[in-house]
Every structure is written in C-alpha cells, then in structure tokens.
Amino acid sequence: MAIYRFRISFEDYDDVLREIDILPKQTFLDLHRALHTATGYNPEVSSSFYVSNDQWKKGDEIAYLPNARKAERGVILMENSRLNRFIDDPHQKFYYVYNFDRPFDFHVQLIKILKEEEGKAYPALFRSVGQVPKLPGAVVVPGESAKKEDEYDFLNETEYGIDEAEDLDMLDDTEDEGGKSDTDNEEGGNEGYEEEY
C-alpha cells in the first residue's frame, strides 16, 4: 500500500515546515490533527483545507467545525473526506486556513508517494524544521513540535525529488477492493490503494 508525504509550510514563515506521512484512505481530519500534533496548536478550532492550483488559489473547501452559514451551504467535511478522493496530481496542493477567528495560513503539498512501512502507525511526522510561531490567543498543547530537529533523519535533498512519471503511474494504476481504478470510480477514490513495487 502507498503512503502520501505532505510538506506543510507556514505561509509567512519560510523557515518552518513539517512533513507528514499519511495513508491515502485516511481523512483530511487525520491530516489536520497530525499537523497540530506536530505544531502543538489546538486542533479543536474551525479550520479548512482548500483544493489549490499551482498558484495556491483556493478551490473547493473541506472544513472542520464549519460555521452555520457554511453548514447550510453543505460544505464538504474533513471527517467525511478521504485524501485519495482529492489527489489527481503527484504535486497536489492544498491551501489550509487554521482558526478562522485568528487565521493562520499554510501551504500543504504532496511531495512524494512512497511504500508503506509495515508495522508503522500513520499519520506519522517524518520531518520537522524550525520553531512554530506563537499564535496570539491560541492555546498551545505539548506535541511533536517539542522534539529537536536533529532527532529526525534528514535525507539528501535529491531524495525529495518527485519522479513525475513514476508517481503518476502510481496514481493511475491503483485499484480499490472492487477492482476499479481511480478513473473508473465516479467518486474519484478507492478503498485499498494497493500497488506493486
């Protein structure tokens, strides 16, 4: 089974990032919580991912704890949205807004599709760089952000390069338990996301 590696960077702090490995069948809520475990920020606030283009322009919204107006519009909910249903590019981008009362913006980009490590729990923090900024009025909870950078295994930058042809094949050739490829499935997702290496 494959995993997605997302690089999450602070829009206004270029020197701070987190990389998180997560299963394609996991939800945006899982990614939301993993991000805040890695930053120490309180995850229990209204936040949204937006499907994005290469210029970080916001598209479809995927929300957590949406306000009444968004709920009436029928906004997509994080807890009901598996990641693989929104990935159609090996460089897929999402714009993320944390805490609409005091917004903080992030860029979330798929940087690699890897093979799952047996026995490892996902989502998992792969890499942590920089100290997260304190948010005015935000409650900070202890989390993975307390670890020092040198505790992580930093790979050579060439390791992060995406072989687009190979990763596109991984996206196109995956099949769900019913044998349908992503392109055959009307909802664009799949259960198993199994592949051969």
Image (cartoon, rainbow, N blue to C red):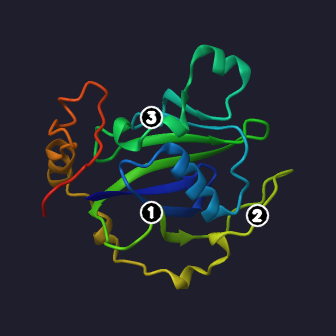
> Camera-side residue: 115 or 151?
115
Looking at the image, is mark 3 or mark 1 earlier in the sequence? Answer: 3
Which numbered dot is residue 94? none
Q: Can you tell which mark lies on residue 52?
A: 3
Q: Which mark is residue 122?
A: 1
Nearer-the-camera pick, 105 or 30: 30
> In the rendered image of this protein, does residue 87 appear above or below residue 193?
above
Label disc, if present, on residue 141 of the rendered structure: 2
Residue that lies at the very extreme toward the top in this rendered image: 73
Q: What separation in Å lies between label 1 and label 2 (alpha carbons)?
A: 20 Å
Disc 1 marks which amino acid? Tyr
Image position, residue 10 (x, y; %): 60, 53
Name the N-terminal-most of marks 1 and 2.
1
Which amino acid, mark 2?
Answer: Val
Identify the mark nearer the N-term, 2 or 3.
3
Task: Please tell me in which quadrant of the rendered image residue 74 appears.
Answer: top right
Can you say which quadrant of the picture contains the C terminus?
bottom left
The relative height of residue 54 versus residue 113 in the rendered view (above or below) is: above
Q: Is residue 60 above or below residue 23?
A: above
